[in-house]
Image: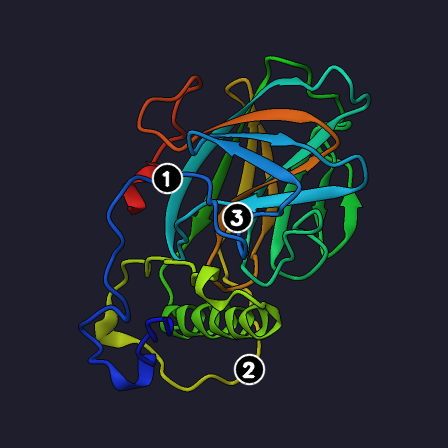
């Protein structure tokens, strides 16, 4: 069966989103384009590392391109047979590879459990300065002011997803088993959006990513981040066990002005 094609943003009225929303709550994705095969996802919110080599990542099912959004993860434990397990958590664009830390390129902003180091574009930077221990809760805040380039970001994301889907389907001998990821379009104001894509990734002035440990802010980690559509993402090294919570009830207080991430569904 051929995949359902998404309409191009250029062909859609500005007052309409490019894709019908997918029903259901935000959860960790099971789709092969959004989850490494080396990770096991249970009940949509628990992820367990199963690989003995390197990091692997899983994205959430929903993305956003503007607004103030929050989710949290709990370091539940680790596979006792796998030592030195670590994880990273944060926000990333779909261009970041799931067979990695999801922060090797310009589209990933991550917090690491090992010494609380933050990562972007494959570059580490000192931030929290302490190890995340079993039972700790790490909160993740994304603050993206409204932009007239949100439609461009959405189109870029869907174009990339379609390309990756076609590449994967071309390599598969079992085409009928390859299903395209059903990623909902973020809700934005389509009335005043730029339509020309200049192929340049620009910073969103006033944007930020901030992390919290057990309810205490660690301060802004990244400012003026790159424009784009961002997913919550978790990267696991070895056998860490992580529970994701997209709301509405959190273990730690919701940051002022933020919405629970599940409200984007």
Which residue is denoted by mark 2 in the rendering? Answer: 199
**Quadrant of image for the N terminus:** bottom left
Of the image marks 3 and 2, the number of the one nearer the N terminus: 2
Pinpoint residue 85: horizontal percent, then vertical percent: 75, 26
Instruction: Using the image as rendered, state which of residue 66 and residue 20 is in the foreground.
Output: 20
**Does 138 sit above or below residue 230?**
above
Q: Residue at x 46, y 83 (%)?
A: 197
SS assignment at label 2: loop
The answer to whether the residue labelled 3 contacts the one labelled 2, judged by CB atoms less than 8 Å apart, is no
Q: Which mark is residue 261?
A: 1
SS assignment at label 3: strand
Q: Residues within 10 Å of mark 1 (few under 14, many from 20)?
A: many
Q: Work out whether mark 1 precedes mark 3 in sequence or the reverse, and give the earlier one.
A: 3
Q: Which residue is mark 3?
A: 208
Residue drawn at x 48%, y 45% is: 30
Residue 2, image x and y in percent? 37, 74
């Amino acid at each position: 069966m051929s995949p359902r094609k998404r309409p191009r943003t250029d062909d859609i009225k500005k007052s309409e989103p490019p894709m019908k929303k997918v029903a259901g709550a935000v959860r960790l994705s099971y789709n092969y384009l959004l989850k490494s095969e080396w990770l096991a996802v249970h009940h949509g919110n628990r992820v367990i590392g199963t690989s003995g080599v390197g990091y692997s990542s899983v994205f959430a099912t929903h993305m956003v391109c503007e607004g103030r959004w929050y989710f949290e993860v709990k370091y539940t434990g680790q596979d006792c047979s796998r030592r030195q397990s670590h994880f990273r958590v944060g926000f990333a664009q779909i261009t970041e590879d799931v067979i990695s830390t999801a922060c090797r390129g310009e589209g990933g902003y991550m917090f690491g459990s090992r010494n609380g180091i933050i990562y972007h574009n494959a570059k580490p930077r000192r931030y929290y300065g302490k190890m995340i221990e079993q039972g700790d809760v790490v909160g993740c805040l994304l603050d993206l002011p409204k932009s007239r380039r949100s439609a461009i970001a959405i189109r870029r994301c869907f174009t990339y997803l379609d390309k990756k889907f076609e590449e994967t389907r071309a390599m598969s001998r079992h085409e009928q088993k390859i299903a395209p990821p059903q990623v909902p379009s973020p809700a934005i104001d389509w009335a005043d959006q730029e339509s020309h894509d200049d192929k340049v990734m620009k910073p969103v002035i006033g944007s930020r990513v901030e992390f919290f440990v057990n309810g205490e802010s660690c301060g802004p980690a990244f400012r003026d981040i790159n424009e784009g559509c961002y997913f919550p993402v978790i990267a696991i090294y070895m056998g860490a066990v992580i529970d994701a919570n997209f709301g509405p009830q959190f273990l730690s207080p919701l940051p002022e002005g933020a919405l629970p991430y599940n409200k984007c569904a």
